[in-house]
Image (cartoon, rainbow, N blue to C red):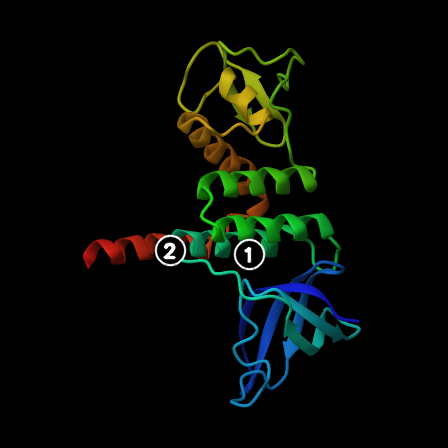
Amino acid sequence: MAQAAFVIHSRPYRETSQLVEVFTREQGRQSLVAKGSRQPRSPLKGLLQPFVPLRVSFAGRGELKNLHAAEASAPAIRLTGTALYSGLYLNELIYYLLEAQTPFDEVFDAYHNTLKKLAQGEGIEPCLRHFEFYMLNILGYGVDFTLDAETGDAVRSGAWYGYRPEAGFVALAGPEPGAYPGDHLHALAELDLSRTEVLISAKRFSRQALGPYLGGRPLRSRALFVKGKRGSRSE
């Protein structure tokens, strides 16, 4: 049975094939062998690319299955510039954070919608922060922005808070490096990223919260983004 999917990673395999990591709506992340997909006349040649909505069918008993068929279900989602690097970053989050062969249909829909927003030119930083916060909550890693994790007291707008991984925010005696203003936490609880300073706090929190689950892996999308910016400056 064919199912909706996106390619999130691929690499050459043997002389004419590919190893393809796909994110499917019904069966989550799957590792597939696309036999002969690099042959000049293969119908799969050029199709197994990121950001192309696909319908795929595959089978196999082990962790590595065989891709039987794939076809585009809609035109490719066109991402350019910073939006392209952002899409690649989403792919890395899917690859590293989601357990293989486990359905995450709601994440699939959120991922697809985020790609479309990026292609439509919506604000990149808010799009990424919304998706990161969503992933943290879906995976059970989210925190309560409205309560002190130590005392249970309500977060106060005029106070300062420090972040404790996997616990939440605790009140501090005053401002110190890395502290979060209470009013920023209230805004994050509402996903109100309309203020630049709150957006900066959201990005810092996302990196702190996701870091332990990414296992210290260097993200290729970030490296490509930095390299691209350096290249554009030298032109």
**Which residue is nearer to you in this view: 186 or 139?**
186
Which residue type carries mark 2?
Answer: Gly
Distance between mark 2 and mark 1 Cα atoms: 16 Å
Judging by the rendered image, the residue that carries numbered circle 2 is 81
User: 10 Å neighbourhood of mark 2: few (<14), some, or many (≥20)?
Assistant: few
Which residue type carries mark 1?
Answer: Asn
Residue 166, given in percent of the width and then of the height, sits at 62, 32
Residue 63, given in percent of the width and then of the height, sits at 73, 68
Picture residue at 52% right of the left edge, 60% below the top: 77
Examine the image and state in which quarter residue 32 appears: bottom right
User: 10 Å neighbourhood of mark 1: few (<14), some, or many (≥20)?
Assistant: many
Does dot 1 land on a helix, a strand or a loop?
A: helix
Mark 2 or mark 1: name the one nearer the start of the chain: 2
Q: Is residue 43 left or right of residue 140?
A: left
Judging by the rendered image, the residue that carries numbered circle 1 is 91
Image position of 135 with respect to 103: above or below = above
Residue 201, given in percent of the width and then of the height, sits at 46, 29
Q: Quadrant of the N terminus?
A: bottom right
**Which residue is nearer to you in this view: 26 or 201?**
26
Does dot 2 land on a helix, a strand or a loop?
A: helix
